[in-house]
Amino acid sequence: LGIFHEMGLPLPPAKIEANFLVWSGSTSVGQCAIQLAKSIACFFITAASPARHDYLKGLGADVCFDYKDPYVVPKIKQAAKDNLAYA
C-alpha cells in the first residue's frame, strides 16, 4: 500500500488513466507493482528478460521490453506516448 501513499495514487477500486513503468518487472516487487497498478487500471510498461515477458503479461503488464535492448528507452517513451506518469 505504500506505493499508493508515496505516489499519491488512489486506492482501488478507483480508476485512473496513466502510464506506469517498472524496470525489472520480474522481481517480486515488480510483480506486485504490476498487479497493484492494474487494480487501478493503469497502462503498465515493464522492462525485463524476454524469457519472462509472457509471465508478466499474464500478471497484467500491457507492454514488456527487453531491458538489454540498446533502444529500450525510446521504445518505452513511444509506448507511453511521451507521457509517463509513474516510474
Image (cartoon, rainbow, N blue to C red):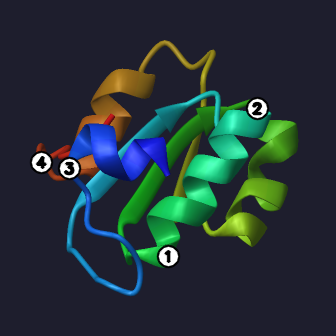
Instruction: Name the residue rendered at 20%, 43% in the picture.
Output: 84
Going by the numbered disc 4, the residue's amino acid type is Asn
User: How many numbered discs, if any?
Assistant: 4
Q: CA distance from mark 4 to mark 1?
A: 20 Å
Which numbered tag is attached to residue 20?
Answer: none
Instruction: Name the residue rendered at 75%, 50% in the picture.
Output: 53
Q: Is residue 63 above or below residue 73?
A: below
Does residue 83 appear in this view?
Answer: yes
Q: What residue sits right under mark 3 in the picture? A: 8
Q: What residue sits right under mark 1 in the picture? A: 39
Q: What residue sits right under mark 4 in the picture? A: 83
- Which of the 4 image quarters holds residue 66? top right
Please say if the residues under marks 4 and 1 sit with CB atoms less than 8 Å apart: no
Instruction: Name the residue rendered at 77%, 70% in the picture.
Output: 58
SS class of the residue under badge 2? loop
Q: What residue sits right under mark 2 in the picture? A: 27
Q: CA distance from mark 3 to mark 4?
A: 17 Å
Q: Residue furthest bottom?
A: 13
Q: Position of residue 4 (x, y in %)?
A: 36, 52
Instruction: Name the residue rendered at 53%, 42% in the picture.
Output: 46
